[in-house]
Every structure is written in structure tokens, then in C-alpha cells.
């Protein structure tokens, strides 16, 4: 089993169980996912590929000259949605439960498998699969996002039951936005267009007026995903968008509160799940006006992402200006890139010879991203409530009096 090589703790303790074999100390992991050749590719170009997998961590680009790359995981076409979730999704949920901001983004050219990876099949009500013999069997193509939320809510339920005496409570708020042509559209409330990104010491980077819906189970999230997808289709038509070229950002804020011996704890984590726009260069095939503007913006935002990563990696830990604000996507993901977050990058590639140059570009991007260092720390505050503090003061006074 390919994925079995990377072991993760199966512990469901509330406290985060770090797995050093996968979550390196710089808190960034990079996974390459190779999609299968399509039938059309096989019928037109045969079975030759532009990449050769060497191991679960090594891959060779077989163009000229050949070049070899090493990542945290190279997942070939035999790695299932479930396998990938077990390796990259489960630890992410554990991290969020432990109070770490987490981010996963899918990068790659159009058609390389980003949406398949992040969302998978969500139509036809098969998304969460059927209940078979009392347990839910996912549809095999169900992707990372629905799996993450199903696991998250299972974990929350388990924790709440196990820690009843601590009055453990959770709040999860979900939002779903699209960045198209450098404009932010709320996909849960499409009347809200051109939203602005703000930054505050208390909230960090956030989108002003973005609708945040409280969700209490995976079904709630699925419903919002479907709603967002419908809104997205409407928006695409309104914008006369031939292809749906946009970044899609799914965010969940997970907060927990509990009490131990009169000390109130408050923990929170921001989970960002991102399906980026395709990275391929826009052909100069007579794109004009709006379409040209669209193409320019898309290139701009992805090259801004590349620039941010370049800067982070070359700064080598020194304080330098990182151009996060050059694009909406890098501004929004500021924490996830070089900041307080544990971040996974799934770089999707096509093995087809006709995509060879794009695949090489993605491998190079992923290799650079592999050098990003994040400083993730737990978001938690503990405070004694006033009543308990009074009792403790009285207790101390008594002790002092007795000593005197
Ligand atoms: P992108 O979002 O990057 O444009 P898609 O996720 O839409 O690409 O994938 C393009 C096509 O390839 C879809 O039909 C998808 O179902 C298929 N595909 C992508 N990755 C895989 C995979 N790992 N296994 C099977 N089919 C895949
Ligand atoms: Mg897609």
C-alpha cells in the first residue's frame, strides 16, 4: 500500500498527536498527485507519460533533460480519495482540533485534478454515500472537503462525550467565497460582491461582511457546498464566463470552550481549503477586452503566489517584505504562507505528454513551496473566572492568616 508508508498516529486524544514523519517542523507538507491518463489521451497519445514515479516520495520528469524531485508524498493514480484523506486530511482535522490554523490548497493546471481532489463528486446526492449496515460508506469519488467535515464532526462528538465534565462546547462557522478577476464574491450570498479583505490584530486577516454560517454536522456543510455551487453557476453565467476561472476558498472557523478547575479555556482554529484556478498560461489566441482582462488577472494572482513563495524561501527566515498584498489570494492566505498555520499543498499534475511543460512547471513550483517555513502555534487563551478567583483569594487569605 503506497500510502501506508507514511504512518500517522491513530490516537483520537484531544491533545494533538504530532507525526514527525509527515508534519515536518516547518509545518508545510507538499504532496504531488498524478491523475490517471484519460481515455482520450490514451487513444491519441498512447500510454507514454511525462513523469515516472520512483517511490512514494520521488518522481522523475522524463522530458529533456530528465529531472528528479522529492516531496513528502507522491501519490499516483492508484491512490484513492480515501487514501489521500487518511494521509493529508485526518492530520489536518487533528491539527484544527488542537487549535492550529490549517490550510490545504490544490495547485495545478486546468484538468489536472484539483476539483476532483478537493471536492470530488458532489452531485446526485451520492456525496456522503449510503448508510450500509449502520455505517456510512462514502461514494469513492467523494473528495477531501466533505471527508474533512464528516471526520471533524465525528471527532467533535467524541470529544464532547468524553469530556462532559469540562462542559466542552464547539462552534463551527463556514464560509465559501470565490475570487474571480481579483474580486471577491460570497458564494453563500451572491448579493455580496466585491468584498474587501481586512486585517485586525484580533481577527487576523478576514473578509469583511462575508457570510459565516454556523454548521453543526457534515450535512449542513454539504448543503452549503451545493448551494454555493449553484450560486457559482449563476454567477458564471452572469459574468458571461466561458470557463469558470476562479479561486474557490472554503473556510471554517472552529472554536471550542471548556473549563478545568475554574479555568475557562478558549481555543480556535481557522481552516482554509482552497481550489486554486488553473495555472496554465493563457494562449494568446485573440483574447480581447474582458476575456483578456480576465486572463491577465488570473496570471497576476498566480504569479503573485509564486512571488510570495519565492520571497519566503529566499529570505531564509530573515525579516523581509513579502508582497502578500499584490493579489487577493495571497493576502487572504497570508497566514497559511509563512505564517501561523500548518499548510498542505496538493500539487496536481497530468502525466500526459501533451501537458509535459505544465507538469514541469507545477513540479518546480511545488519544490520551491517545499522550502516554506511556517511558525504554527496553538491559538488558545485560558482565563480564570472571577468567582473562582475570589474563592482562591479567600483560601489564600485564610492560609496567610493561619501562618501569621
Ligand atoms: P481541475 O479542477 O484541476 O481543472 P478536475 O478535478 O476537474 O481538474 O479533473 C479533470 C478530470 O479528470 C475530471 O473528469 C476528473 O474526474 C478526472 N480526474 C482528475 N483526477 C483524477 C483522479 N485522481 N482519479 C480519477 N479521475 C480523476
Ligand atoms: Mg477545477
Image: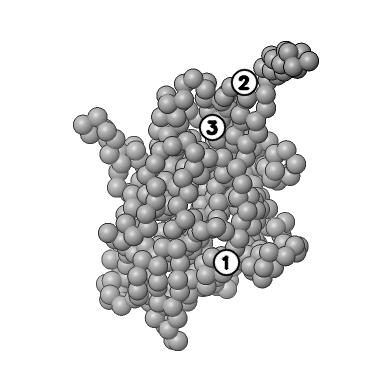
Residue 107, above or below 402: below
Which is in the foreground here, disc 3 or disc 2? 2
Tell me residue 53's x, y (percent). Answer: 35, 72
Choose between 168 and 40: the one closer to the eye.
168
Q: Quadrant of the N terminus?
A: bottom left
Residue on which the image places disc 2: 262
Q: Is residue 284 visible?
A: yes
At 50% from the left and 30% from the top, the residue drawn is: 215
Q: Quadrant of the C terminus?
A: top right
For label 1, the SS is: loop
For label 3, the SS is: strand
Which is in the foreground here, disc 2 or disc 1? 2
At 74% from the left and 17% from the top, the residue drawn is: 403
Tell me residue 290's x, y (percent). Answer: 64, 59
Tell me residue 77's x, y (percent). Answer: 32, 62
The color scheme shown is one colour
User: What residue occupies the far front of the structure in this picture?
Assistant: 404
Q: Tag 1 or tag 2, which sits nearer the N-term?
A: 2
Residue on which the image places disc 3: 172
Tell me residue 334's x, y (percent). Answer: 66, 53
Residue 196, above or below 356: above
Q: Is mark 1 within 8 Å of ligand 1?
A: no
Badge 1: how crowded within 10 Å, few (<14), some, or many (20+)?
some
Residues at marks 1 and 3 touching, judged by CB atoms closer than 8 Å? no
Choose between 386 and 380: the one closer to the eye.
386
Choose between 171 and 361: the one closer to the eye.
171
At 59% from the left and 34% from the top, the residue drawn is: 267
Residue on which the image places disc 1: 371
Q: Tag 2 or tag 3, which sits nearer the N-term?
A: 3
Q: Tag 3 or tag 1, which sits nearer the N-term?
A: 3
In the image: residue 126, left or right of residue 379: left
Badge 2: how crowded within 10 Å, few (<14), some, or many (20+)?
some
Amino acid at each position: 500500500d503506497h500510502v501506508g508508508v507514511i504512518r500517522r498516529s491513530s490516537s483520537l486524544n484531544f491533545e494533538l498527536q504530532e507525526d514527525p514523519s509527515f508534519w515536518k517542523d516547518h509545518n508545510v507538507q507538499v504532496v504531488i498527485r498524478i491523475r490517471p491518463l484519460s481515455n482520450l489521451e490514451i487513444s491519441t497519445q498512447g500510454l507514454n507519460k511525462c513523469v515516472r514515479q520512483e517511490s512514494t516520495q520521488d518522481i522523475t520528469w522524463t522530458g529533456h533533460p530528465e529531472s528528479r524531485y522529492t516531496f513528502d508524498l507522491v501519490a499516483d493514480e492508484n491512490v484513492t480519495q480515501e487514501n489521500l484523506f487518511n494521509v493529508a486530511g485526518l492530520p489536518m482535522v487533528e491539527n484544527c482540533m488542537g487549535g492550529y490554523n490549517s490550510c490545504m490548497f490544490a495547485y495545478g493546471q486546468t484538468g489536472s485534478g484539483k476539483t476532483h481532489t478537493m471536492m470530488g463528486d458532489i452531485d446526485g446526492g451520492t456525496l456522503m454515500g449510503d448508510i450500509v449496515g449502520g455505517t456510512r460508506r462514502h461514494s469513492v469519488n467523494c473528495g477531501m472537503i466533505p471527508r474533512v467535515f464528516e471526520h471533524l464532526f465525528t471527532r467533535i462528538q467524541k470529544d464532547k462525550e468524553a469530556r462532559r465534565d469540562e462542559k466542552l462546547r464547539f462552534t463551527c462557522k463556514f464560509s465559501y467565497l470565490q475570487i474571480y478577476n481579483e474580486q471577491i464574491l460570497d458564494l453563500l450570498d451572491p448579493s455580496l460582491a466585491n468584498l474587501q479583505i481586512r486585517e485586525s490584530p484580533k481577527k487576523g486577516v478576514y473578509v469583511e461582511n462575508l457570510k459565516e454560517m454556523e454548521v453543526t454536522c457534515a450535512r449542513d456543510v454539504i448543503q452549503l457546498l451545493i448551494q454555493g455551487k449553484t450560486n457559482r453557476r449563476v454567477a458564471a453565467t452572469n459574468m458571461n464566463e466561458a470557463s469558470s476561472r476562479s479561486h474557490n476558498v472554503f473556510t471554517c472557523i472552529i472554536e471550542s470552550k471548556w473549563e478545568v478547575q475554574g479555568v475557562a479555556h478558549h481555543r480556535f482554529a481557522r481552516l482554509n481549503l482552497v481550489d486554486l484556478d488553473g495555472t496554465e498560461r493563457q494562449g494568446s489566441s485573440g483574447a480581447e477586452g474582458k476575456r483578456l482582462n480576465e486572463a491577465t488577472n488570473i496570471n497576476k494572482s498566480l504569479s503573485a503566489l509564486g512571488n510570495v513563495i519565492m520571497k519566503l524561501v529566499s529570505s531564509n527566515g530573515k525579516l523581509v517584505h513579502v508582497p502578500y498584498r499584490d493579489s487577493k489570494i495571497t493576502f487572504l492566505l497570508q497566514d497559511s504562507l509563512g505564517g501561523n498555520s500548518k499548510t498542505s499543498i496538493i500539487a496536481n499534475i497530468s502525466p500526459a505528454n501533451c501537458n509535459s511543460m505544465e507538469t514541469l512547471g507545477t513540479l518546480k513550483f511545488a519544490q520551491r513551496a517545499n522550502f516554506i517555513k511556517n511558525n504554527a502555534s496553538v491559538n488558545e487563551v485560558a482565563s480564570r473566572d472571577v468567582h473562582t478567583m475570589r474563592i482562591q483569594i479567600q483560601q489564600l487569605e485564610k492560609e496567610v492568616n493561619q501562618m501569621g
